[in-house]
Image: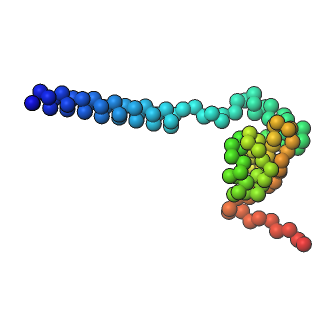
Amino acid sequence: MKLLLQNNSKKIGVGIALVLLVFVVGNLWFFYQPESDVTSEKDVEKILSAVSRHILIPQDQEFSILTIDDPEAVAKNQAFFLGASKGDKLILLPSKAILYNPKEDILINVGPIYFDNQNVPQTDE
């Protein structure tokens, strides 16, 4: 009977160890996998060149390029994204945002960027 309990304990220990190993490896893979939306330098140049045919982009400013994955969700939260499609590019400059459709080679929207701590300029009517 004692031998049977020892074998069961070893099996349970091995099972727990395997479950923990799978959990740890899964988490490492999930959290440390390379970004799938990383835009290569060649892609960035291509996007900026295409957008520059439509609007002036200052070359001395830092920018970010993001890909729109769920246009309906972002359009619900921000009217700026109305008309966006999956795969459109959002170019963020310090003072403005540009929404670009690379498939149709058109600008969907361009607008200033306001942060919560800035005063939004008022228009005179």
Q: Position of residue 23 (x, y in %)?
A: 40, 35
Task: Name the quadrant of the N terminus.
Answer: top left
Count the numbered circles shown: 0
The residue shown at (80%, 50%) is 83
The one nearer the camera, 29 or 119, is 29
Residue 114: name its quadrant: bottom right
Task: Name the quadrant of the C terminus.
Answer: bottom right
Q: Position of residue 54 (x, y in %)?
A: 89, 41
Residue 122: name its quadrant: bottom right
Task: Tell me how the rendering is colored.
Answer: rainbow
The one nearer the camera, 81 or 40, is 81
The image shows residue 74, relative to residue 121, as above or below, that is above
The image shows residue 34, relative to residue 90, as above or below, that is above
Q: Is residue 64 visible?
A: no
The one nearer the camera, 37 or 123, is 37
The residue shown at (54%, 32%) is 33
Q: Position of residue 105 (x, y in %)?
A: 86, 38
The image shows residue 113, relative to residue 93, as above or below, that is below
The residue shown at (72%, 29%) is 41
Q: Position of residue 40 (x, y in %)?
A: 70, 30
Q: Is residue 68 visible?
A: yes
Answer left or right for 31 relative to 120.
left
